[in-house]
């Protein structure tokens, strides 16, 4: 037998062995799932299979063309199926059902009481850390540890997200949004909305996270990108733009000198980003030891909170200084803060602006509140402590947007999955129009006073719930509300009509684009927002 034949036989044998193993695992998982007596859907390929995650949508699209293409396989076995499915599966099968795969069984829950119990009993439902290990790019962090380590990290990191940080977020968001609307309003048509919003979000993180402030520059007006090692901003931008690649390949592999120049630049950015964090870490450590004050941002606050926790533990219990965070844990958490806070807020802002452009009456409703709360005061007179809490309609726009388009995902052989899309669109919780974007559903009016509606616990969980809730929740709310206030206080936005379109048909086209062109990439996002250019005009 020749070498080619041996190679072919070896490949066929490997494929056959893998297929046999997968089907045996699928059968075992199916038999275990049947014992629960709940509805089951069987999928032949695991959700988390790395190769499948690359080709899933292409193969599912091809299978759908076949006579038997409409099946559980094509309905559920691709990334982002929940966005299309919404609450349909739970309406068909009830509050709980299971997807059986060769790897794990996935239990989907759409019952508020049961989910709250899951959130409360964190130790009984540990997260599958093997899924989150990819986030250990710069060190262990809140997303990749459990038990005592998680409690320690949660306590220290949560203390950094405070009102002082929120005030910085408010001030920086106002300034950047003012520059952004000045840029947009100077053009007859804007196709760079998504890119410009990501720039705003990056700059807010730069200031609040690292104390670095940058002037807004539109994607249209920017020149060729500087080297990722040129400054902190460029290194962070490159890291965030390529975080999936970094997580998949790892920084050690990206250091290989024979890799293409693009990959070498990604590694260069990782090195520069860590070098910046190390510089700040050493300076903050010296300032803490000498009792000196320093610029308060998330990184400096994290270092100080860690040092103070270590000192308190050492003085009160005689425990070693390891009660604080290690240098690697500080770097790891700073990466996760940026990773979690960048695209989530940016995508939500993009969805909200698109929805508002398609709904001029809601823009007027929003502006009415902005005029009442902010009046004709200059931007520098807008105060976080007195104004933010009064902008309830701005917050309602945020809540309604993340209800329908939650930019996050949740993930042992059985994994309990909160059905975010189903919970947020189930008519039992949201009335007869759960798929309609209607921010006014969040406002309860009692005479002249408006209050934000508090939904039933467990039915609205875009920032998770309980101990696992996102520590940066208010950070994102403040950034969103401040940006909305600047954009819609004096301005209105409309979709630019195409040739032969009326204003009404242009708005319908934009709503259709939101519905049909949104999908899960890393997060849920509009795939081609540039296909619906927007025009801004003064009120």
Image: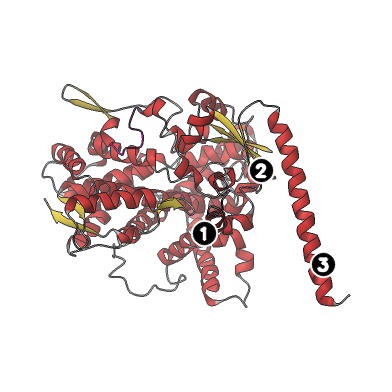
Label 3 vs label 1: CA separation?
38 Å
Residue 434 in the magenta stretch? The answer is yes
Residue 34, visible in the rendered structure = yes
Picture coordinates of residue 268 (x, y %)? 53, 70
Q: Secondary structure at mark 1?
A: helix
Label 3: which residue?
Answer: 9
Identify the mark nearer the N-term, 2 or 1: 2
Q: Residue at x 33, y 38 (%)?
A: 400
Q: Is residue 386 above or below residue 19?
A: above
Label 3 vs label 2: CA separation?
28 Å
Q: Residue at x 74, y 48 (%)?
A: 22
Between 46 and 407, the one nearer to me in the picture:
46
Q: On the picture, is 439 further left or further right than 205?
A: left
Magenta residues, start to end: 432-438
Badge 2: residue crowd in 10 Å (few <14, some 14–19, many ≥20) = many
Q: Is residue 449 above or below residue 352?
A: above
Residue 469, visible in the rendered structure = no
Find residue 101 and name its label. Answer: 2
Identify the mark nearer the N-term, 3 or 1: 3
Q: Where's the N terminus, which quadrant?
A: bottom right
Prevailing secondary structure of the magenta residues: loop
Find residue 243 and name its label. Answer: 1
Evaluate if marks 3 and 2 touch, with contact meaning CB atoms under 8 Å apart. Answer: no
Between 342 and 440, the one nearer to me in the picture:
440
Badge 1: residue crowd in 10 Å (few <14, some 14–19, many ≥20) = many
Picture coordinates of residue 430 (x, y %)? 36, 29
Q: On the picture, is 334 further left or further right than 250?
A: left
């Amino acid at each position: 037998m020749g070498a080619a034949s041996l190679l072919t036989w070896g490949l066929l044998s490997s494929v056959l062995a893998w297929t046999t193993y997968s089907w045996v695992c699928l059968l075992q998982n199916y038999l275990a799932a049947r014992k629960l007596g709940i509805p089951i859907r069987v999928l032949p390929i695991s959700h988390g299979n790395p190769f499948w995650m690359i080709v899933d949508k292409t193969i599912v699209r091809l299978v759908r063309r076949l006579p038997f293409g409409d099946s559980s396989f094509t309905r559920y076995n691709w990334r982002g199926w929940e966005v299309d499915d919404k609450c349909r599966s739970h309406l068909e099968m009830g509050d709980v059902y299971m997807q059986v795969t060769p790897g794990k069984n996935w239990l989907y829950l759409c019952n508020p009481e049961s989910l709250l119990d899951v959130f409360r009993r964190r130790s009984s439902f540990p997260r599958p850390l093997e899924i989150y290990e990819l986030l250990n790019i710069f060190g262990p962090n809140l997303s990749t540890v459990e038990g005592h380590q998680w409690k320690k990290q949660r306590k220290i990191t949560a203390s950094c997200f405070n009102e002082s940080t929120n005030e910085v977020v408010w001030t920086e968001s106002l300034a950047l949004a003012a520059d952004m609307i000045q840029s947009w309003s100077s053009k007859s048509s804007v196709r760079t909305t998504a890119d410009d919003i990501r720039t705003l979000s990056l700059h807010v993180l730069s200031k609040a996270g690292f104390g670095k402030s940058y002037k807004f520059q539109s994607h249209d007006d920017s020149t060729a990108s500087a080297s990722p090692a040129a400054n902190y901003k460029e290194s962070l931008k490159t890291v965030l733009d390529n975080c999936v690649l970094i997580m998949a390949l790892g920084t050690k592999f990206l250091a290989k000198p024979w890799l293409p120049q693009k990959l070498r630049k990604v590694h260069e950015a990782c090195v520069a980003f860590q070098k910046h964090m190390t510089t700040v870490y050493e300076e903050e450590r010296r300032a803490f030891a000498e009792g000196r004050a320093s610029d308060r941002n998330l990184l400096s606050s994290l270092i100080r909170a860690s040092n103070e926790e270590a000192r308190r533990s050492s003085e009160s219990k005689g425990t070693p200084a390891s009660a604080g965070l290690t240098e690697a844990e500080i770097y790891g958490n700073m990466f996760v803060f940026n990773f979690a806070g960048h695209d989530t807020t940016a995508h939500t802002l993009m969805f909200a602006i698109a929805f508002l452009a398609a709904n001029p009456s809601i823009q007027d409703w929003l502006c009415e509140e902005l005029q009442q709360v902010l009046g004709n005061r200059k931007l520098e007179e807008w105060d976080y402590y007195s104004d933010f809490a009064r902008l309830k309609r701005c917050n309602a726009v945020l809540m309604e947007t993340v209800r329908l388009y939650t930019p996050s995902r949740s993930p042992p052989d059985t994994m309990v999955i909160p059905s975010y899309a189903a919970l947020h669109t189930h008519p039992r919780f949201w009335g007869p129009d759960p798929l309609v974007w209607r921010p006014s559903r969040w406002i309860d009016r009692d005479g002249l006073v408006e209050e934000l509606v508090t939904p039933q616990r467990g039915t609205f969980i875009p920032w998770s719930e309980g101990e696992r809730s996102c520590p940066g929740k208010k950070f994102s709310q403040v950034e969103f509300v401040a940006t909305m206030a600047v954009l819609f206080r004096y301005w209105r936005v409309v979709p630019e009509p195409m040739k032969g379109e009326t204003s009404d048909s242009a708005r319908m086209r934009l709503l259709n684009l939101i519905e049909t062109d949104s999908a899960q990439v890393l997060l849920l996002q509009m795939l081609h927002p540039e296909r619906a250019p927007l025009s801004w005009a003064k009120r």
